[in-house]
Amino acid sequence: MKIFSCICLALLLGLGNSVAFAGNEQCAELINTRCQGCHYKSRICQALGKKSKWKWKRSVSNMVRYGAKLSGAEQKIVIECLSSAPVGADYVCKE
């Protein structure tokens, strides 16, 4: 019960959001360093909220076949990030 209370308190204080935020920063870094070499951010940003997770997975897999340097773990981060990002997400769309 004590552990459950600590977890709930951490979530209420917003500590759970810091994990998501770190993932967003990692996603933004990957997009800036690995995707933007071939795509303008506006192209990626325009697809947010329109593509399903499966379609993002297919897009990322295609980009890796075309030469994008993303490890399996990095692909998962990018796919999860882009498929859950809201339209116009700052961490993806800001220049």
Image: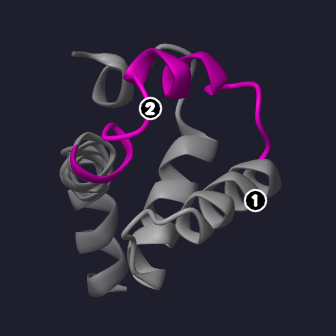
Which residue is drawn at the image coordinates 39% and 80% (left, top)?
71
| Mark 1 crowdedness (10 Å alpha carbons): few <14, some 14-19, many ≥20 | few
In the image, which residues are magenta? 33-52
Which numbered disc covers residue 17?
Answer: none
Are discs 1 and 2 less than 8 Å apart at CB? Answer: no
Q: Nearer the viewer, residue 29 or 69?
A: 69
Q: Is residue 50 above or below residue 25?
A: above
Is residue 46 covered in magenta?
yes
Q: Does 41 sit left or right of 79 as displayed?
A: left
Q: Label 2, on which residue?
A: 39
Which residue is drawn at the image coordinates 79% and 49% (left, top)?
55
| Mark 2 crowdedness (10 Å alpha carbons): few <14, some 14-19, many ≥20 | few
First along the sequence among labels 1 and 2: 2
Q: Nearer the viewer, residue 58 or 51?
A: 58
Of helix, strand and loop, which one carries label 2?
Answer: loop
Which kind of residue does numbered mark 1 sit on?
Arg
**Percent x, y for residue 60?**
60, 58
Q: Nearer the viewer, residue 90 or 37?
A: 37
Q: How far apart are labels 1 and 2 at the CA level?
A: 16 Å
Q: Label 1, on which residue?
A: 58
Q: Does 27 sit left or right of 45 as displayed?
A: left
- Residue furthest front in the image: 66
Q: Nearer the viewer, residue 85 or 1?
A: 85
The quarter of the image holding the C terminus is: top left
The answer to which image quadrant residue 93 occupies is: top left
The answer to which image quadrant residue 8 occupies is: bottom left
Of helix, strand and loop, which one carries label 1?
Answer: helix
Which residue is drawn at the image coordinates 52% and 34% (left, top)?
85
**Percent x, y for residue 17?**
28, 47
Q: Is residue 32 above or below residue 8?
A: above
Which kind of residue does numbered mark 2 sit on?
His
The quarter of the image holding the N terminus is: bottom left
